[in-house]
Image (tube, grey):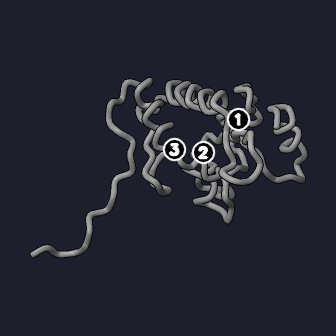
Amino acid sequence: MTVEQCGAVFAPTSRQASSNYGIDSNGRVGMYVEECNRSWCSSNAENDNRAITIEVANDQIGGNWHVSDKALAKLIELCVDICKRNNIKRLNFTSNKNGNLTMHKWFALTGCPGPYLESKFPYIADEVNKRLGSNESSKPVESPSNTSGS
């Protein structure tokens, strides 16, 4: 899907869905809803009111819902830009709703963003944080085990 096609999907108000940005497989970016306004993206008003949302086009339908290298690179670049403009010092991926990098599937019954892009979230956070100058790893923190040792 091109950024124009994605924008056309969101254009009718009857769709009741949108995102702030879209990235196509060629790495082109479209803005559909200004950052100061809420998009209807994650099916959750609380998240949508605090989030800047990004739809990323797949270059494979089904399977892992692969995303092109150009789209992934542009996603990282866009996240860095968003963080800098909004004074976000660090992108925090926690593998749950508690971080500031979240997934649609945590708020609705959907497979979005798909297995491929989902697997890239720690990498995305790490790359964004390197460019922001934050050196801490973004790997999810595991909860300590409740088993007792002898």
Residue identified by numbered label 2: 117
User: Which residue is pictured at 47% across the width and 38% down the height?
Assistant: 123
State the image coordinates of residue 62 (x, y, percent, origin top left): 74, 53
Residue identified by numbered label 3: 121
Marks 3 & 2, CB-CB < 8 Å contact: yes
Q: CA distance from mark 2 to mark 1?
A: 16 Å
* Relative horizontal placement of residue 47, taking residue 136 as reference (left or right): right
**SS for callout 3:** helix
Which residue type does callout 3 highlight?
Phe
Q: Residues within 10 Å of mark 3 (few under 14, many from 20)?
A: many
Q: CA distance from mark 3 to mark 2?
A: 7 Å
Q: Earlier in the sequence, mark 1 or mark 3?
A: 1
Which residue type does callout 2 highlight?
Leu
Say which mark, if any, is on residue 139.
none
User: Which residue is pictured at 65% across the width and 42% down the height?
Assistant: 53
Q: Residues within 10 Å of mark 1 (few under 14, many from 20)?
A: many
Say which mark, if any, is on residue 21.
1
Q: CA distance from mark 1 to mark 3?
A: 17 Å
Marks 2 & 1, CB-CB < 8 Å contact: no
* Relative horizontal placement of residue 53, taking residue 18 as reference (left or right): left
Of residues 121 and 102, the one drawn nearer to the viewer in this rendering: 121
State the image coordinates of residue 2 (x, y, percent, origin top left): 82, 33
